[in-house]
Structure formats: structure tokens, C-alpha cells
Amino acid sequence: VKPVAGLNCGECHACQLSAAGTHGDFRWIQPEGKSRAIKIDQVRAAIEFTHQTAGFGQRKVIVLAPADNLNHFAFNALLKALEEPAQDTHILLLCHRLHGVPATIRSRCQKIPIKVPSVEASIAWLNEITGDSAVSARLLEVSENAPLLAQQLYEEDSADLAIERRLALRALLAGKVSVTQIWNLWGDVDSEVFLEQLASELRYAVRTSAEDQSRSERGKDLFRLLDEALRLLSAVRAGANPGKQLLCDSLLSKCHKLLAGSSAASAQVITS
Ligand SMILES: [Zn+2]
């Protein structure tokens, strides 16, 4: 109620409710249970909330995190809410990958880039979660210095397995290992997680490759594979249920076939 230097005072009733996570004019929407995406029912409930009167008689705030991971139907519901905004309501969409949010949504939002914290700050923060600075450093490295992604990796799997999977995909895309050498690492991962990890590694390969990506054959192959992984990912999020083994195996083989030949490391390739 009485902000101090632009921040909340920490003392009033509203601040106490916020600290306890029970402020009635605030909703933090995130994936529930085992799901990795916010569901349409959650988006609908959030929109319904925007039409209620604020309990404190002022504003309501909704955060959707992550906002780049909604399925087609949830995005459509959200779009309607953005086209006909409720009064005195702020909707914050948090994401790491802006291109994961449809242009129709993006064009109705104000973009506020948030800088990635320094490696030192990220490791200090991760240490509070992992309790092991060597683990924190490796998690941060495989997450390309994105601390929230590193936290997510740590919480999803045992950290070692998460790191091993990332590095295995990276080695496959570099043509250093074959599909059969790394296949067993995805035994109990669902298709969505597998496709997300593959897409993330393909993006990493695009970004870190020194060649002029738009011209080189390898660059074109990387983009093609990324498109295919993203297309399959949105199909899976919309409810498609392709056999995981078939899906992963064919996609990984394709990656291996296309990229191994053009990779500098092709001398080490073992055919699968
Ligand atoms: Zn306060």
C-alpha cells in the first residue's frame, strides 16, 4: 500500500498476504502436477479471475510462467483475454524463448527483456538449491547460463542424468556418437521432454556454430531439424501421442545422418 523506493513496504496487510502467497488479487499460473505446460482450463480460470473485482479495490495481477509452453487452444483463450482486456488487470507472460509465443500474442504485449544474471550470481543462487557448487556449475553450463533452466533440469532428473542427456545430444549433433550409443538415456522420458531437449540443443548448435548458418549446408540442416522438432513438439502438446521410441529414434537418426556428414568431427562417427 505504501511502496518504498518502488518496492513493496513488506509490512502492510497486502504485503503480508503476498509474502504468504495468499493475496487474493494475485495469481501465479504454472504447470500443475506432472504436466510441463499450462493447460487451457488454467488459462480459462485465470481469465475468469480477471473479471472479478479486486479484493483490495485496486489492481489484479496474473503471471503465466512459462508462457512459451502453452498449447494452441490455451494460446487462443489467452488471445481473447488480451483483445478484450479486463479493467485494472496486469497480465505478465514470462518466457525464455520469445519465438515460442505466437506473433498474435506478442504483438499485444509490451516486451521487457530481463538480463541473464552473471555466472557467479547464478552459481551462488543454484548452490542454495543443489548444495554442491560443482553440480551447480555443470548445470549452468549445460543450460547455457540460464539459471531457471538449470534449476528445472536439476529438479526434473537427478542432476547427473540431466547433464548426461544434454551432453549426449550435443555429442550426437556434433557427429561424435551414434544414436544407439545414447539411446538408453531416454528410457523413461516422455516424448514432450525429449523433444524439448532436442529442440534446445538444436538451437544451441545453431547459435554456437561458427559458420554462416543461413548459407552452409549444416546450417540449413540444423534449421530443418529444429523446425521438425518444434512441429512435433506442438503436435505432442496439442495431444498427439506418437510412439516415443519411433519418434525419438527416427528424429535422432535423421539428426545423425544429416549432421554427421557435414560435421568437423565426422571422423569419429560410428554408424548406427
Ligand atoms: Zn505493503
Image: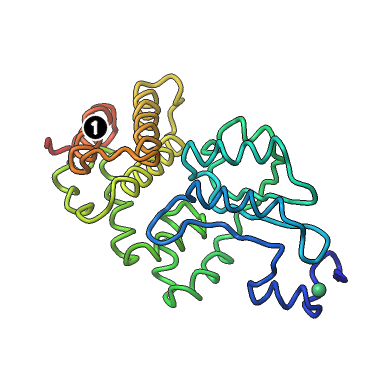
For the point 62% across and 36% down, the residue is: 79
Residue lying at the far bottom in this picture: please name it.
Answer: 11
Q: Position of residue 262 (x, y in %)?
A: 28, 27
Left/right placement of residue 88 relative to residue 92 reads right
Please name the residue shown 38% across and 45% down the image: 196
Quarter of the rendering occupied by the N terminus:
bottom right
Front residue (pair 92, 7): 92
Q: Nearer the viewer, residue 243 or 264?
A: 243
* Ligand 1 lies in quarter: bottom right
Q: Residues within 10 Å of mark 1 (few under 14, many from 20)?
A: many
For residue 259, which quarter of the picture? top left
The x and y percentages for residue 37 are 45, 50
Q: Which residue is mark 1?
A: 260
Q: At x 29% / y 33%, what residue is drawn?
A: 264
* Amino acid beneath label 1: Ala
Find residue 66 and report its horizontal and vertical position in percent. Answer: 53, 51
Residue 107 sits in which quadrant?
top right
Q: Is residue 78 above or below residue 45?
A: above
Quadrant in which the C terminus appears: top left
Q: Is residue 185 left or right of residue 145?
A: left
